[in-house]
Image (cartoon, rainbow, N blue to C red):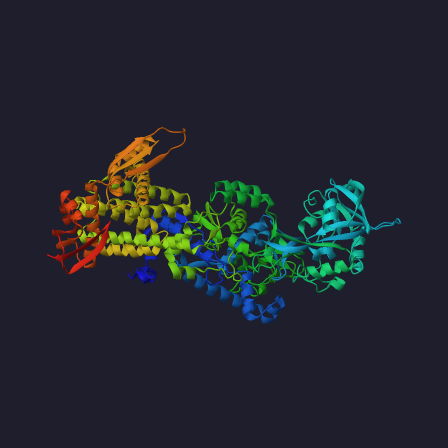
């Protein structure tokens, strides 16, 4: 195959020969492995995180297939929700809900369906090009009727367990998307906001020279019109402070810093007391004049309006003044305190976040108009100081805009009683990395009931029908159940079609569907059984729960938790047995990628520059659970390693052609180098297999690439003389070793780099008559533990260090390895190291090119320390010098032979013209015969010459001319 286009050629080969289908068929009916695809959102071209995620999934699927498992690999797509609605709205130039209603909900839903289905097809093709083998032809889609039925099944179960209830609560609200958000749908960002210190005038009947004020602090200026109380901590110390313009109340330990650093006022403390003494103290709201009629109506029903209330839990002195603005309609903590003091959840912002029925504030927008509220407070004389702070603020996970709090009546899912069981069941789950378990438990333990419905259009319809006369409620749990209610059901179960389905209540009224749709996290939370076609089909449900899932760390608070909440309610069991988590892909500086910063790297860009295999190979090595700082220079290292893999095969191919070799499966006696390499192969197979079974995916790649790099950089380097100078048996042993190791490397590495391994496998088939059609149809190699020699591997580890140190010593004195030296001295405090050097001294001699090795055991300076050193005798005797000249000349002549296009069997007459000393040394120390044999010359003539093939070079300190004629 053409190396420039081998990925395209491999894709064609897979398609033409139906390799994916053959791989699935091979294990059909064998032990099952249920992989559950976490559905990516169907929004078009995949980004680099989605590519990494799905390639990792492909890796583990390939491993289990090679190990004989019948893998359930159904793809899937998350299709509902606001991201799709927002895209379609943008395409159709629709800004608000009323625009959608005018356009027509039916037409809008059809556009959403088309957008989702078209993008799912694009994504499937993208993933296939990345070598991801999943069942995309039958991918589950959350928009399908059978998937919707699976969600209705869950809602019915929850209803039967009395887990679904309606309540008015303070919830996070996205004004941009016009819908409520659950806790898991929030993303927190560090933002800069204005915090404000306000003064609220204390009401008093007594005549006083100076007004008294409460110093109140808040980070949400827009909520001040909804302020109904001020919270203080009953156990904290508070003080009254006198200044030129009034008397102020604040927490004692904040008084000095506030007055001197923040307000820059001269002051004196005139009173001290506990916070509980302030309970019931009335104050005048700064917007009393603007909202007088509203506040007075509230006061008639709720006597504690605009008074000081107590809270140990939500008031401290880490920031602010020790007096906290309380708006029970604008935050769950405020609501909790408000309930205690019978204060209402006062909040009059609409779905767009705009103030309604609030007199002069009508039309102002929560959060966005913070500065306008600050200006008004300043005009009213209430603003004491504006201070910019940086803090975490919740944003909508869909549109990424800041959210607000809003009091809203919603359908909630009761889960509090399930938390202990979910945490206990998590003990059985294998988490990689381990901290995933801790994060999951912490998230679960702090989880509260969340709304499960949204006031939107494109989603699974909430299957609740309510009588318009008697308010009777029915929950529909399946299509069959719906058919029992009405004669005809719509072909599409989405809004607005499902809203037309009505039937008569026993009282004579009409059963009308609640207009809400389900939260999209119910969509993905029910994937565990929906992926298996359950409950519409029971055929595959025995596979539940999933053996393995894999997603980013953020899914601890999203998909991982929702899967188990849903399955525990519906099926009384958790959804998965093992989890692998990866981090986010960032740029090389660790910055989040974004269009605005111009630092986005697309998978297409990486593939175009480096190829699919290189992308996978590079990304797979990132530590589990950690973010990935993408670095182009690091990617290039993997490119070079892939070239090394290819070069090993080319070397093997050249050996086969040059020496007419075929694999004979180790019928010959192995040397230490072969025993070591075969041991490394089997220990690697054993370790990589264990790593995969423990789902330590990030550690597998390094083990495999270390093996083939060891084959290239250690073994092949060590046996070059055995190939060039050895007999047929030596050559066969080396060939068999390289062949056997490389073949097993290709099989294991195919989980990471499916294209290049397939390409090389096809060359194996062509050159060496391997019978198996595809590398991916191989069984996973089994480690032969009898061939694992841990002691030998440790000894080789020592030997490699000695060789490296010896070569470094040569480099220091500028003596290259073609010049033999007389002695290498190795000193060590470790007996095993000394034994290793002694036992494998011949290898060290060849690699460092020394005649003798002297290992010495020296005394330890401490019990724990192991030290060693390497030294060379660099004195050159005439015989060593002669040998050095012969090696240098041989290398130059061999290069000239290659340039002339000669093969090994071509015999030459060689001519050398140089200083007489070289000729004398070569003859005197018997180097001529060695040189003739090495360059395949029947004669070497030392004289001036004229030859067809010639060259000259500096050999050590002498200029040498050399050439040859063919015999």
Which residue occupies 55% across, 70% down? 92
Image quadrant occupied by the C terminus: bottom left
Residue 68 visible in the shown view = no
Residue found farthest to the front: 916
Q: Is residue 743 left or right of residue 455?
A: left
Residue 171 visible in the shown view = yes
Q: Is residue 89 left or right of residue 634?
A: right
Using the image as rendered, state which of residue 580 and residue 700 is in the foreground.
700
Residue 516 vertical position relative to residue 94 in the rendered view, above or below:
above
Image quadrant occupied by the N terminus: bottom left
Q: Percent from the top left, x then y, of residue 734?
A: 22, 46
Using the image as rendered, state which of residue 536 and residue 632 is in the foreground.
632
Which residue occupies 70% across, 58% down? 222
Q: Where is residue 408, by image quadrant? A: bottom right
Residue found farthest to the right: 207
Using the image as rendered, state which of residue 426 and residue 530 is in the foreground.
426
What is the count of numbered marks? 0
Q: Where is residue 518, by image quadrant? A: bottom right
Which residue occupies 53% across, 44% down? 439
Q: Percent from the top left, x then y, of residue 739?
A: 25, 48
Q: Percent from the top left, x then y, of residue 125?
A: 41, 62
């Amino acid at each position: 195959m053409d190396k420039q286009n081998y990925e395209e050629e491999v894709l064609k080969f897979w398609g033409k020969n139906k390799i994916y289908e053959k791989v699935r068929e091979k294990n059909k009916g064998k032990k099952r492995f249920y992989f559950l695809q976490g559905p990516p959102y169907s929004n078009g071209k995949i980004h680099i995180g989605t590519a990494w995620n799905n390639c990792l999934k492909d890796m583990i699927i390939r491993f289990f297939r090679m190990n004989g498992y019948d893998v359930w690999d159904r793809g899937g797509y998350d299709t509902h929700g606001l991201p799709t609605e927002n895209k379609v709205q943008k395409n159709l130039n629709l800004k608000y809900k009323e625009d959608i209603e005018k356009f027509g909900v039916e037409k809008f839903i059809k556009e959403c369906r088309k957008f989702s289905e078209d993008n799912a097809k694009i994504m499937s093709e993208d993933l296939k090009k990345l070598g991801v083998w999943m069942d995309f032809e039958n991918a589950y889609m959350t928009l399908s009727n059978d998937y919707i039925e699976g969600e209705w099944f869950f809602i019915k179960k929850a209803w039967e367990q009395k887990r679904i209830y309606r309540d008015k609560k303070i919830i996070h609200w996205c004004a941009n998307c016009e819908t409520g958000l659950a806790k898991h749908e929030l993303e927190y960002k560090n933002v800069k906001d204005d915090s404000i210190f306000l003064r609220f005038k204390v009401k008093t009947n007594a005549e006083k020279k100076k007004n008294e004020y409460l110093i109140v602090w808040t980070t949400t200026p827009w909520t001040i019109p909804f302020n109904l109380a001020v919270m203080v901590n009953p156990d904290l110390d508070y003080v009254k402070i006198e200044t030129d313009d009034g008397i102020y109340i604040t927490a004692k330990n904040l008084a000095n810093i506030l007055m001197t650093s923040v307000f820059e006022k001269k002051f004196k403390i005139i009173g001290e007391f506990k916070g509980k003494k302030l309970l019931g103290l009335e104050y005048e709201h700064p917007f009393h004049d603007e909202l007088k009629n509203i506040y007075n109506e509230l006061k008639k029903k709720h006597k504690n309006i605009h008074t000081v209330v107590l809270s140990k839990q939500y008031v401290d002195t880490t920031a602010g003044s020790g007096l906290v603005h309380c708006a029970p309609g604008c935050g769950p903590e405020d609501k909790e305190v408000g309930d205690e003091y019978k204060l209402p959840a006062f909040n009059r912002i609409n779905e767009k976040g705009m103030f309604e029925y609030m007199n002069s504030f009508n039309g102002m927008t929560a959060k966005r108009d913070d500065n306008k509220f600050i200006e008004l407070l300043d005009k009213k004389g209430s603003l004491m100081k504006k201070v910019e702070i940086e803090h975490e603020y919740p944003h909508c996970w869909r549109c990424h805009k800041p959210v607000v709090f809003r009091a809203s009546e919603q359908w909630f899912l009761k889960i509090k009683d399930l938390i202990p069981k979910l945490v206990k069941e998590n003990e059985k789950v294998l988490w990689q990395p381990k901290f995933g378990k801790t994060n999951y438990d912490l998230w679960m333990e702090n989880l509260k009931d969340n709304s499960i419905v949204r006031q939107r259009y494109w989603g699974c319809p909430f299957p609740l029908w309510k009588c318009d006369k008697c308010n009777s409620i029915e929950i529909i749990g399946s299509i069959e159940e719906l058919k029992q209610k009405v004669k005809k059901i719509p072909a599409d179960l989405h809004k607005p079609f499902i809203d037309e389905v009505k039937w008569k209540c026993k009282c004579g009224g009409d059963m009308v569907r609640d207009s809400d749709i389900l939260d999209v996290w119910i969509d993905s939370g029910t994937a565990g059984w929906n992926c298996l076609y359950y409950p519409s089909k029971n055929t595959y449900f025995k596979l539940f729960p999933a053996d393995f899932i894999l997603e980013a760390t953020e899914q601890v608070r999203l998909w991982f938790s929702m899967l188990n909440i849903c399955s525990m309610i519906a099926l009384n069991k958790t959804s998965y047995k093992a989890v692998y988590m990866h981090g986010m892909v960032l740029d090389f500086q660790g910055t989040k990628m974004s269009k605005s910063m111009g630092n986005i790297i697309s998978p297409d860009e990486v593939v175009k520059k480096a190829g699919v295999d290189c992308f996978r190979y590079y990304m797979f090595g990132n530590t589990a659970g950690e973010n990935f700082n993408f670095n182009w220079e690091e990617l290039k290292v993997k490119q070079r390693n892939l070239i090394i893999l290819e070069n090993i095969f080319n070397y093997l191919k050249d050996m086969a052609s040059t020496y007419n070799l075929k694999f004979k499966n180790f019928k010959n006696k192995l040397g230490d180098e072969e025993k070591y390499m075969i041991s490394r192969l089997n220990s690697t197979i054993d370790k990589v297999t264990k790593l995969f079974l423990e789902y330590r995916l990030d550690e597998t790649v390094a083990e495999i690439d270390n093996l083939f790099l060891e084959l290239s950089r250690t073994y092949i380097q060590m046996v070059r003389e055995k190939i060039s100078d050895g007999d047929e048996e030596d050559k066969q042993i080396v060939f068999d070793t390289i062949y056997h190791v490389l073949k097993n490397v290709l099989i294991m590495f195919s989980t990471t780099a499916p294209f290049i391994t397939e390409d090389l496998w096809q060359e194996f088939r062509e050159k060496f008559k391997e019978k198996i059609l595809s590398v991916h149809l191989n069984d996973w190699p089994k480690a032969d533990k009898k061939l694992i020699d841990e002691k030998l591997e440790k000894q080789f580890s020592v030997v490699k260090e000695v060789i490296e140190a010896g070569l470094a010593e040569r480099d220091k004195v500028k003596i290259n390895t073609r010049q033999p030296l007389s002695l290498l001295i190795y000193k060590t405090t470790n007996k095993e190291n000394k034994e290793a050097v002694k036992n494998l001294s011949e290898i060290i001699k060849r690699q460092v090119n020394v005649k003798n090795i002297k290992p010495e055991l020296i005394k330890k300076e401490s019990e724990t320390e192991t030290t060693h050193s390497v030294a060379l005798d660099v004195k050159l005797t005439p015989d060593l010098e002669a040998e050095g000249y012969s090696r240098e000349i041989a290398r130059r002549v061999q290069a000239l032979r290659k340039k002339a296009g000669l093969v090994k069997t071509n015999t030459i007459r060689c001519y050398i013209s140089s200083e007489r000393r070289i000729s004398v040394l070569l003859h005197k120390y018997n180097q001529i015969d060695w040189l003739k044999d090495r360059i395949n010359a029947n004669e070497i003539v030392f004289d001036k010459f004229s030859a067809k093939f010639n060259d000259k070079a500096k050999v050590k300190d002498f200029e040498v001319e050399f050439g040859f004629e063919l015999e």
